[in-house]
Image (spheres, coloured by chain):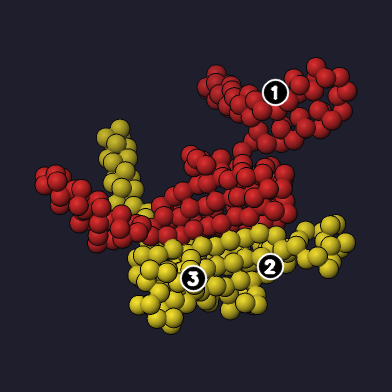
């Protein structure tokens, strides 16, 4: 699959993350590694290489030999996204990337605000007692 | 490979690994929910203890908590570093740190801890020193450099506080 533009990648990734969070099962794999181009190796040695970012739902396309007769091919589609980030775009890209991940990963533990409030209230009481 | 206890330790070790093998090291972030088979097992085992089973089983089935696993892996050396969390509050900070790592940031520029610059200067001294004895001691100092630096900074903070009290 050819690498997507950043906007398209983010919308697809947000969709993938929110679907996984809604189902509350399955995984999303995000991989980052330097993209080493063999053609322009002389140029890239001096400067930073671009970063290749991949996202997948980890759904293997290979059919299980035990159940391949039962399963339909249409249900076994693996979602694969990829994009290439140039070194000068890294900061802006990762700012967006962090936003998309924060919004999409809703299945993680939320910050427990009740405890914080209780602590604050306790601290306030203690301060009042001192006064 | 074992999981590192803190995200800071994970990011520090990852940046060192990326510096050592910048071309082949990859970072994988896995956002995953616990598998359904594990939940079934836990509920079946919990049923053997009727008193504790019902409160423990119901929240897990109602809202399974996802985990975020960060993995830095280098295939040539076989080194694998992992960090796992389930706190949503950490996501933003971790992803931005991964961006810094992708940009080739070293330990010092991550801004996580003070002792990193001391280690870097230690490396430079090692190269300059010709005899074997000093290089070996230099290497030892490098590995232990993080602790004394942290202690000295902490002591400095204390002394400042003491001075403040004296003036009052």
Question: Outermost residue, left direction?
Answer: B50
Residue A128 or residue A94, whichever sits in front: A94
Q: In this view, does B149 lie above or below A80?
A: above
Q: In this figure, which residue is indicated by the disc labeled 1? A: B140
- Disc 1 secondary structure class: helix
> Which of pointers 2 and 3 indicates the residue nearer the eye?
3
B107 sits to left or right of A75? right
Residue A111 or residue B25, whichever sits in front: B25
Circle 2 residues within 10 Å: few <14, some 14–19, many ≥20: many
Which residue shows up at 75% across the image and 62% down it?
A36
The subunit carrying tag 1 is B
Image spot of residue A125 (x, y percent): 27, 40
Q: In this view, does A95 lie above or below B46?
A: below
Q: Is residue A115 visible in this depiction of the protein? A: yes
> What is the C-alpha distance between the residues marked 2 and 1?
39 Å
Q: The red chain is which one?
A: B
> What is the C-alpha distance between the residues marked 3 and 1?
50 Å
Q: In this figure, which residue is indicated by the disc labeled 2? A: A85
> Which of pointers 3 and 1 indicates the residue nearer the eye?
3
Q: Which chain is yellow?
A: A
A35 sits to left or right of A98? right
Mark 2 in CB contact with mark 3 (< 8 angstroms): no
The subunit carrying tag 3 is A
> What is the C-alpha distance between the residues marked 2 and 3?
30 Å
- Disc 2 secondary structure class: strand
Which residue shows up at 45% across the image and 72% down it?
A63
The subunit carrying tag 2 is A
């Amino acid at each position: 699959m050819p690498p997507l533009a950043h906007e398209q990648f983010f919308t697809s990734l947000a969709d993938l993350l929110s679907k996984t969070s809604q189902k509350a099962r399955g995984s999303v794999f995000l991989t980052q590694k330097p993209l080493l181009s063999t053609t322009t190796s002389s140029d890239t040695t001096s400067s930073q290489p671009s970063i290749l970012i991949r996202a997948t739902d980890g759904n293997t396309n290979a059919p299980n030999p035990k159940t391949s007769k039962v399963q339909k091919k249409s249900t076994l589609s693996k979602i694969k996204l990829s994009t290439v980030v140039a070194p000068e775009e890294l900061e802006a890209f990762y700012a967006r990337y962090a936003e998309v991940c924060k919004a999409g990963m809703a299945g993680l533990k939320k910050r427990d605000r009740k405890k914080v409030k209780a602590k604050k209230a306790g601290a306030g009481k203690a301060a009042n007692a001192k006064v | 490979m074992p999981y590192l206890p803190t995200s800071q330790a994970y990011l520090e070790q990852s940046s060192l690994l990326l510096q050592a093998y910048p071309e082949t090291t990859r970072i994988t972030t896995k956002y995953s929910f616990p598998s359904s088979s594990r939940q079934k097992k836990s509920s079946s085992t919990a049923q053997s203890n009727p008193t504790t089973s019902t409160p423990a089983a119901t929240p897990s089935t109602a809202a399974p908590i996802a985990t975020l696993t960060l993995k830095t892996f280098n295939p040539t050396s076989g080194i694998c570093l992992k960090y796992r969390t389930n706190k949503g509050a950490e996501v933003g900070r971790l992803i931005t740190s991964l961006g810094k790592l992708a940009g080739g940031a070293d330990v010092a520029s991550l801004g996580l801890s003070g002792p990193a610059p001391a280690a870097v200067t230690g490396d430079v001294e090692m190269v300059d020193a010709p005899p074997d004895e000093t290089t070996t001691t230099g290497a030892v100092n490098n590995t232990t450099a993080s602790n004394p630096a942290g202690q000295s900074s902490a002591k400095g903070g204390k002394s400042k506080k003491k001075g403040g009290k004296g003036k009052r």
